[in-house]
Structure formats: structure tokens, C-alpha cells
């Protein structure tokens, strides 16, 4: 990295060199040389030979210590150094005496001082994350100069071409493709948006040092700016003072589009086009049409499952805020185009269609644009673009009036749809090409056409989600009111028959909606809002209606009956119409096992088949990773989901239907997370079939989309994974080995039993969860609008949300939801049969599913620390309960590590991913002290025995520790 090499370059003046020396060895570090040396040795071991990254971390760390020396209280700076030194000694010796010395330092600090110490450690993590991201970007830039980096479009297309995928076959693939990440507001992002902005400023200031054109004075100024940004970061409170509202969550999701995603989206399409030309030749590539396969979805403002704060008006707000965001982007890009297309009359031959459209615009807009168009009367494209801008401003104004609560004003000058806007853009494109300016048309104009085709006027398709019992209750009350039928007393077959008949009833059922209970009235009102917003924003503004906890076919038909009351579904003159798509969500182990029965009943229902027929014969099915993993453990979940996908595709084929699978993945392995490219390739053969939809949330959005280059990389890796996994559309792919499937059946059965023995049959386990983790305090972070439990005061495993479940275990360094049961199942299956180890090794080597499963488990095992987990176990009110449950978790951790290393045939975890291993090891030096501090704070908080813990002086430093540990582990839930 240029900025680090330059520290020793000859062009640095002596005075500047002296200043840089201060960064390298601050007074604070000199006073604490022992601790710094111990940590430096640990970091050097972790970094291996990566000198540039090591230098970058050293630079940022030395600037941080310089800021601390100047800004922090002396006792805080001293405590940080002493805690680092004592923890290093504790790691080295592990004696009770070393632990006592560490705790004595904490005992000598008050709540405010501990809070400041935690903030310093959080600062280290923030800067470490920035150094790693910057280094990764540098490596990608170096690799991408050759274009053939693993997972790139070039690399993927070459492999496809060499495997027999011709340009014609590739077109078939592209025409079927849909890559659809869906943003959710699940509360897994612990950072405030203000902090994210401060972090980005540090990142940009550090990146500026890479500029090789900087001379000595400029570099010195850049370093000063970097120090100022780090100083600002340390003075920005990372704990939210108030709970996030849904409007805040909507705004947080929209933040990433102007930051990176608009530009990244255009670059992904451009990079694919360039790769096609390089791999297939320009002539052939010119015949390949690239459809808009990359799109975005959202749950933010549409997901009301368990969130009483999401109302029908919230859904309206979400769509209007999305529309405002994309229309503002269109206006900015129209201005850019107007600055570029300066063609004059007489110097270009315009197409008749373009001239006619210009005349039509002037006739439509009339006197409203007389003054506006005067400067451009000699420049046809600029003239057209200023009129387009006026129309787009009118369109935006209509949306903003609604956002401000004003009555909608009819405006015939506004664009009625994105199709009208695209028509105007394509007229300009065709005219430019007609007079030899195709190369100019391929610049910003092509990007704007692509963006309009991708984002429409809604930016993201908004999914709606609600829990199945809410629909059953509403339908039951409506049928009782309208037809005097006791719906809940009917069996499943009777319910299906009744619902099918009622859906087709012309004009809907006759009942007084105002007389319904408030909850059922709200459930019904949502469908009225959906019909309204389709008219206001556009017919494609909604994605699917997701039904969580789908247990039966009638749950799907209930939604359609409610939709029929708003005119979204029905039958008129013998013709069915359907303006809503339903996506049943299967999320528990039992639900996954019932998929075949539910889908068969659903597809056998004639009215539902008719509704699918008028909806392109494509069914979307959502699979829940989080709840299935919390329910039955990682093995039963992963294998149940894999098996379910095979069943879904087979059933869909039997009925002649297409099917898109929607993967409800979280950020962590315990919630289905992990690298997207590898996860797509690990799906069962011939199940992806060109389309994939998956949730992204919280810290995943931040790490993937907080800067444009990373966003391009992440989107590219996802799309190329989709291309590779969909090759079955155009050529035969080998099926999984039946014997491997049988092995996984056994492993999943044993693993689920082991997991349920722990979480459901171990006395005191739930007490351990609530007492040996900060789950009760996490809500104080105010990181989301949704409650952490489905039902208040219900401490059962079923009630706690999967996010809070995984978040709490991760904080206490017991990430067992991602691995518990794997070690026991492997050991049990191989017991007395050593030849089975070779079977498992072959599966790990040859089968992407099994390899991905154990690779993700390795990452989660590496983030666990059983020595630290023991500290949390000692928080239990009953010491015997703490010891019993801890021993079970620690024993399985050791068993998992031993067996996975045996199967992977290696001597350490993550040996095949040294970069990740080094990153995790770098964090250990700072994570450990934070965990000890957190245990200390939890104990102090609980000792106060006060009902209102928010008033305790220990609460805020505890919340800071939760934030800091989340930053150090780079995930929450």
C-alpha cells in the first residue's frame, strides 16, 4: 500500500518524518512498552507475512493512541494499557492469580471510566475493520486488473464456455435469471447511522493516503485529517439514546442506495458486458441480451410479523420513501445527461420519432416550461432532457405531497409510469445511434436506462409478512359475520373447499368491516392499502405476501380470501385475476417435514391453480433458516432445508410449475449466514434454476454495501454463484450420491437429538440462557423496532426471537447454535466403524453441501471461547446449573473441533481460509478483555436488584460492551 511505503520515502521532509515518527511510537505506547510488545507479537503471528496490512494496523493504532494521549483521561489510558498487559499475561499463563490481577484493575474503576475503556476497545475494532477492508480492496484491485480473479464474470464465463455452455445456451440462462437480495429491518445492526458515517469518513481519509501523487506536505495534511476523523469517531456516542422507529429503519435501508448501490448496480451490468466481449468475442457478445436480472427487495415497513409498530400506514410510508429516493436519483442523472448531450441542430440528424416526441412534450407542458426551455432551443437533446426533468419533478412532487400528508393533486404533466420515462430515454438512445453516436449512448444514458429498468418507480419490491394465525382469526370473524359459519371448527379439507368458493364470490363477501375487532380490521385494511399503493406507485411495487408459520394449505388460501375483499383477487366473467403473490414460509423442523403434504394440497386446489396460471405459473416458497436452526439445531436445519428444496422442486415439476426459492438467511452461521457465493453453490443440484431470493440485514448490509467497490464485489460474487448453480437449465448436472444423502439423514437425526437434549431436556437450560448471557440487556441497545420475544414475559425457546437467541450466545462467546450436535453426530456415526471416517473425508472433499456445512461450523467454532464462556456460566444464580450446562457446551465444542479437524485432515481450524483465521486471531487480544469487562458489568448491574435497570450507572457501559463485542466479532444475529 502506497501510503505505508511512503513513510520511509525520500520525499518526506525531516520535519514531516519526525511527525510521522510520533505516530509510530507515541508517548502512550512508550509508557506501556511491555503490553504493546506482547500484543504486537500476537498481531504479527496473526498477520503472517502480510506486511502491508500489519503496517496499516500499526499506523491506525498509533494514531488512536496519540489521540488517547491528548484527549482521554489519564486513568482511562492507563487502565486500557494495564488491562491489555494483564490479559496478555492471563492468556499466556491462565492462572487464578493472573485472573485476580486483571479483575482488580476493573474493581478500581467506576462505571464512567469502564464505559470509556470499552469505547477505546471499540475504537480498536473499528480501525481494525477499516484496515482489513482497505487491504481487501487493495488486493481486489490488484487481482481485478487481470479481470480473471476467482468468482469474477471473466472467470465464470470461461468455465461455463469450456464446459460446453455456448452463447445460445448462455442466453437461455440469462433470460431465466433473477438475483434478488431483500433488505430486512431485523435488529442485528448495533451501529448507529451516525457512527457508520464517522467510520466511513475514517475509511475515506485512510484511503486518500494510497494516492501515489501525494507529496510530503499533502501526505502530512492527509495524516492530520485521518487523525481528526479518528478523534471525531471517539467523540461520537455509539449507544442510541432512543429506540429506532420503523421510519428510521426505512431510512437506514435507503441509505445504501445513494452511498453505493446505484453506482454498483450499473457497474455490475457493465462488467458483465465487458466480460462477455472478452470471452465470446465482441460480435457474439453483441447478440447476447442482458436482461435486468439484478433487482432488490425489502421487508422494511412491510414485515409486521411480531412487530406491532408496523401498521398499514407504515407500508404506505415505506413505498413513498422508496419512490422519493429513486426519483431523486433519476433527477440527478438527468442533470448529468443534460451536461453531456450538447448536440446542436444542423450537426446531427435526429430521428423522426425523437422530433415528434419533443413536439408532443411541448404541447403537453405548454406555458409551464416556456422559460425553462429557452436556453436549450438550439440543442435538441438538452431541450428534451429539461422537459423530462420537469415531468420527473412533477412525479416526485406528487409523492412528496403524500409524504407530507397533503391530499394528492392530479397532475397530468407527471410521468404516469416508469414505462413512459423509459420510452423517452430510449428515443434519445435510438436517435443518438442513428447519427453515429452509439459510443456516447453507451455512457451515462445506458446507465440511466438500466437503472430505470431495474428500479422502476418503487426502487425495491416491498414484501409484506404476517403470521398465519392473524389471517385465520380475521377470516374466522369475517365468515362468522357474513355467512354465520364457524370456520375454526372445520377440518382442513372443509376449510379449503369453503375458502376456494368464497375467493370466487363476485364483489367479495358482505360484512361490516368497521364492526371487526381492531386487530382483524387492521389485518384486512392492509390489503386495501396494497391495492391503493399499486395504483399510486405502480403495479410492481409489491413483491410477495409472506406467511410466517405456514402449517397448512388453508393458510395460503386465507390470505387470498382477504385479498379478494380488496379486489386484488377474483373471478369476473369466468376469468380469474390475481394481483398478489403468496409465499408460504416454512421455518420449523416440523414445517419443513410437512412441505410435501401442504404443497400437494395447495396445488390440488383448482382455484389456486387458476390463480397461479394467471400469475405466470411461478410459485415462490420461503425457507426459514433462523427458526429451524433454533428449533432443531444446525444439522437438522441445514439438512432439512436441503431436503425440502428437493421436495419443492419435484412437486412443482409434477404440477408443471416453476418455483423460486426464497432463503431467509441471517448474518451469522447460526441463522443460515456465511459467504453468499459458496452458499448458492452448496444448494442441491438442479434446484436453483436461475432464480434466487434471500434476506440481508443489519451488519451484513453494512459490510457489503458501505462502499461502492465492496458492493460491486459482493453483488458480482452472488451473481456468478447463481450462474454456476443454474447451469442445469442448459445441460445435465450430476446428482448427489444417494449414499451421501443417507449418511446425512443419519447425521441430522443424531444431531437433532443431541441439540434437543441440551435445549429442551437439560434441567435449567433456559435459566442458563437468560442468566449466562446479556439477552435481557440487549433490548436496551434500541437497535430495532421489533420486540426480541414473540410474547412478553414468555421465556420459552419458542418465544425468543432467533436473532436475540444467536446475538446473546455470540456475546457470551458460546456460538453453539451454529455447531452444537455436529461433533456428537460425527462421533456417534463413526463409533466402532473407523472406515466411516474415510466416507466423511470423501464427502468433505467432493460434496459442496457438506464442505460448506463444516466450513461454516469452523468459522463459528473459531469465534467461540470456552474459557471466556466459563466466566459467563458463573453468572448463573444456581452454580450447579451453570456448571452442568457449561460442561455440555464445552464438551461438544471440543468434540466438534476434534472431529472436523479429522475430517478436513488438518491441524487447525480455518486452515483453508488463512485470511479469516488471521482476522479472528487479531481480534482475540481485544475481545477477551471486553468479555471479562462485560461479565463484570452484568454482575454489578444484577447485584443492584432494581426494577428499572436503565437508571443504573452500570447499564450504559454494559450496552457499550455489547456494541464493542458485536463490532469485534463482526456480527450480532
Image (cartoon, grey):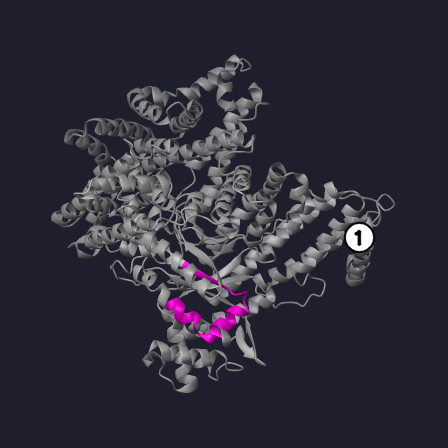
Q: Is residue 516 left or right of residue 897?
A: right
In the rendered image, the vertical position of residue 269 relative to residue 353, given as above or below: above
Q: Element type at marker 1?
A: helix
Q: Is residue 252 left or right of residue 796?
A: right
Residue 880 at x, y percent in the picture: 11, 48
Relative image position of residue 538 (x, y in whole percent): 60, 63
Q: Is residue 763 magenta?
A: no
Front residue of 171 and 538: 171
| Rendered residue at 28%/42% (across/down) | 839
Disc 1: which residue: 373
Taking the view exactly as shown, the residue that stands out farthest to the left is 880
Q: Residue at x 76, y 44 (%)?
A: 341
* Residue 775, visible in the rendered structure: no
Q: Which residues are magenta?
A: 598-622
Residue sitting at the far right:
346
| Crowd tier of the residue under label 1, counting other residues whose Cα lies within 10 Å: few below 14, some 14–19, many 20 or above | some
* Placement of 555 over or under 756, stated as above or below: below
Q: Position of residue 60 (x, y in %)?
A: 43, 28
* Closest to the observer, 269 or 103: 269
- Residue closer to the observer: 299 or 744: 744
Q: Residue at x 26, y 44 (%)?
A: 814
Amino acid at each position: 500500500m502506497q501510503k505505508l511505503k511512503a513513510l520511509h520515502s525520500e520525499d518526506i521532509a525531516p520535519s514531516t518524518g519526525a511527525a510521522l515518527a510520533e505516530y509510530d511510537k507515541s508517548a502512550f505506547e512508550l509508557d506501556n512498552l511491555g503490553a504493546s510488545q506482547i500484543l504486537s507479537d500476537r498481531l504479527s503471528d496473526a498477520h503472517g507475512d502480510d506486511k502491508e496490512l500489519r503496517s496499516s494496523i500499526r499506523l491506525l493504532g498509533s494514531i488512536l493512541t496519540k489521540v488517547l494521549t491528548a484527549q482521554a483521561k489519564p486513568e482511562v489510558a492507563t487502565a486500557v494499557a494495564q488491562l491489555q498487559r494483564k490479559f496478555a499475561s492471563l492468556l499466556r499463563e491462565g492462572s487464578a492469580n493472573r485472573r485476580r490481577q486483571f479483575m482488580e484493575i476493573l474493581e478500581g474503576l467506576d462505571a464512567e471510566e469502564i464505559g470509556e475503556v470499552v469505547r477505546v476497545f471499540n475504537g480498536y475494532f473499528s480501525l481494525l475493520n477499516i484496515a482489513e477492508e482497505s487491504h481487501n480492496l487493495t488486493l481486489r484491485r490488484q487481482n481485478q486488473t487481470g479481470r480473471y480473479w476467482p468468482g469474477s464474470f471473466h472467470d465464470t464465463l470461461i468455465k461455463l464456455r469450456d464446459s460446453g455452455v455456448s452463447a445460445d445456451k448462455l442466453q437461455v440462462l440469462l433470460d431465466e435469471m433473477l438475483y434478488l437480495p431483500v433488505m430486512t429491518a431485523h435488529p442485528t445492526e448495533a451501529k448507529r447511522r451516525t457512527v457508520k458515517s464517522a467510520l466511513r469518513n475514517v475509511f475515506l481519509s485512510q484511503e486518500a493516503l494510497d494516492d501515489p501523487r501525494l507529496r510530503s506536505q499533502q501526505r502530512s495534511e492527509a495524516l492530520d485529517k485521518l487523525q481528526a476523523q479518528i478523534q471525531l469517531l471517539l467523540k461520537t456516542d455509539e449507544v442510541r439514546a432512543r429506540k429506532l422507529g420503523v421510519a428510521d429503519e426505512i431510512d437506514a435501508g435507503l441509505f445504501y442506495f445513494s452511498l453505493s448501490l446505484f453506482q454498483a448496480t450499473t457497474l455490475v451490468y457493465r462488467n458483465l458486458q465487458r466480460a462477455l466481449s472478452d470471452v465470446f468475442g465482441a460480435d457474439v457478445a453483441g447478440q447476447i441480451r442482458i436482461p435486468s436480472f439484478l433487482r432488490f427487495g425489502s421487508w422494511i415497513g412491510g414485515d409486521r410479523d411480531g412487530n406491532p409498530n408496523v401498521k398499514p400506514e407504515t407500508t404506505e410510508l415505506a413505498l413513498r420513501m422508496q419512490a422519493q429516493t429513486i426519483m431523486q436519483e433519476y433527477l440527478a442523472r438527468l442533470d448529468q445527461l443534460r451536461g453531456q448531450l450538447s448536440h446542436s441542430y444542423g450537426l446531427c440528424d435526429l430521428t423522426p420519432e425523437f422530433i415528434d416526441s419533443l413536439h408532443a412534450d411541448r404541447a403537453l407542458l405548454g406555458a409551464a416550461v416556456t422559460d425553462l426551455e429557452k436556453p436549450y432551443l438550439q440543442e435538441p437533446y438538452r431541450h428534451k432532457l429539461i422537459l423530462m426533468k420537469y415531468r420527473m419533478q412533477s412525479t416526485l412532487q406528487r409523492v412528496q405531497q403524500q409524504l407530507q400528508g397533503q391530499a394528492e393533486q392530479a397532475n397530468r404533466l407527471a410521468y404516469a409510469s416508469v414505462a413512459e420515462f423509459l420510452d423517452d430515454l430510449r428515443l434519445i438512445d435510438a436517435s443518438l445511434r442513428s447519427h453515429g453516436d452509439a459510443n456516447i449512448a453507451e455512457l451515462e444514458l445506458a446507465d440511466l436506462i438500466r437503472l430505470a429498468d431495474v428500479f422502476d418507480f418503487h426502487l425495491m419490491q416491498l414484501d409484506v409478512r404476517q403470521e398465519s394465525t392473524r389471517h385465520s382469526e380475521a377470516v374466522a370473524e369475517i365468515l362468522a359475520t357474513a355467512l354465520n359459519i364457524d370456520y375454526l371448527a372445520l377440518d382442513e379439507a372443509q376449510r379449503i373447499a369453503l375458502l376456494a368458493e368464497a375467493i370466487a364470490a363476485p364483489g367479495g363477501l358482505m360484512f361490516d368491516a368497521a364492526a371487526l375487532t381492531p386487530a382483524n380490521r387492521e389485518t384486512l385494511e392492509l390489503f386495501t392499502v396494497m391495492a391503493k399503493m399499486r395504483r399510486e406507485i405502480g403495479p410492481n411495487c409489491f413483491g410477495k405476501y409472506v406467511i410466517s408459520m405456514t402449517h397448512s394449505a388453508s393458510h395460503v388460501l386465507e390470505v387470498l380470501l382477504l385479498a379478494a375483499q380488496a379486489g386484488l383477487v377474483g373471478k369476473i366473467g369466468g376469468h380469474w385475476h390475481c394481483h398478489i403473490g403468496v409465499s408460504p414460509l416454512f421455518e420449523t423442523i416440523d414445517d419443513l417435514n410437512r412441505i410435501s403434504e401442504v404443497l400437494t394440497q395447495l396445488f390440488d386446489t383448482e382455484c389456486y391453480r387458476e390463480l397461479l396460471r394467471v400469475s405466470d405459473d411461478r410459485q415462490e416458497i420461503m425457507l426459514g433458516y433462523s427458526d429451524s436452526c433454533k428449533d432443531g439445531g444446525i444439522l437438522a436445519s441445514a439438512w432439512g432445508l436441503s431436503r425440502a428444496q428437493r421436495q419443492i422442486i419435484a412437486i412443482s415439476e409434477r404440477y408443471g410449475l416453476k418455483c423460486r426459492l426464497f432463503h431467509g438467511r441471517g448474518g451469522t452461521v447460526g441463522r443460515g449466514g456465511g459467504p453468499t457465493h459458496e452458499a448458492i453453490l452448496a444448494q442441491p443440484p438442479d434446484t436453483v434454476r436461475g432464480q434466487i431470493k434471500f434476506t440481508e440485514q443489519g451488519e451484513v448490509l453494512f459490510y457489503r454495501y458501505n462502499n461502492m467497490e465492496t458492493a460491486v464485489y459482493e453483488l458480482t460474487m452472488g451473481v456468478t454463484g447463481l450462474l454456476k448453480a443454474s447451469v442445469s437449465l442448459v445441460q445435465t448436472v450430476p446428482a448427489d450420491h444417494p449414499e451421501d444423502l443417507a449418511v446425512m439423514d443419519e447425521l441430522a437425526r443424531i444431531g437433532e437429538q443431541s441439540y434437543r437434549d441440551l435445549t429442551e431436556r437439560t434441567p435449567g437450560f433456559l435459566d442458563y440462557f437468560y442468566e449466562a448471557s446479556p439477552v435481557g440487556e440487549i433490548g436496551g441497545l434500541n437497535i430495532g423496532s421489533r420486540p426480541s420475544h414473540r410474547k412478553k414475559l414468555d421465556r420459552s425457546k419458542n418465544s425468543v426471537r432467533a436473532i436475540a437467541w444467536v446475538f446473546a450466545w455470540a456475546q457470551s462467546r458460546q456460538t453453539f447454535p451454529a455447531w452444537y450436535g455436529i461433533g456428537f453426530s460425527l462421533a456417534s456415526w463413526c463409533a466402532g466403524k473407523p472406515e466411516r471416517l474415510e466416507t466423511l473425508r470423501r464427502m468433505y472433499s467432493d460434496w459442496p453441501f457438506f464442505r460448506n456445512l463444516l466450513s461454516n461450523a469452523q468459522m463459528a467454532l473459531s469465534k467461540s471461547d470456552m474459557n471466556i464462556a466459563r466466566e459467563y456460566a458463573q453468572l448463573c444464580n444456581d452454580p450447579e446449573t451453570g456448571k452442568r450446562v457449561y460442561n455440555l457446551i464445552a464438551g461438544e465444542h471440543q468434540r466438534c473441533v476434534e472431529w472436523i479437524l479429522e475430517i478436513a485432515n488438518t491441524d487447525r481450524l480455518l486452515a483453508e481460509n488463512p485470511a479469516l483465521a488471521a482476522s479472528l486471531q487479531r481480534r482475540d487480544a481485544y475481545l477477551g478483555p471486553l468479555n471479562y469487562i462485560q461479565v463484570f458489568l452484568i454482575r454489578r448491574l444484577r447485584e443492584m436488584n432494581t426494577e428499572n435497570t436503565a437508571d443504573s450507572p452500570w447499564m450504559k457501559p454494559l450496552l457499550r460492551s455489547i456494541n464493542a463485542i458485536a463490532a469485534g466479532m463482526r456480527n450480532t444475529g
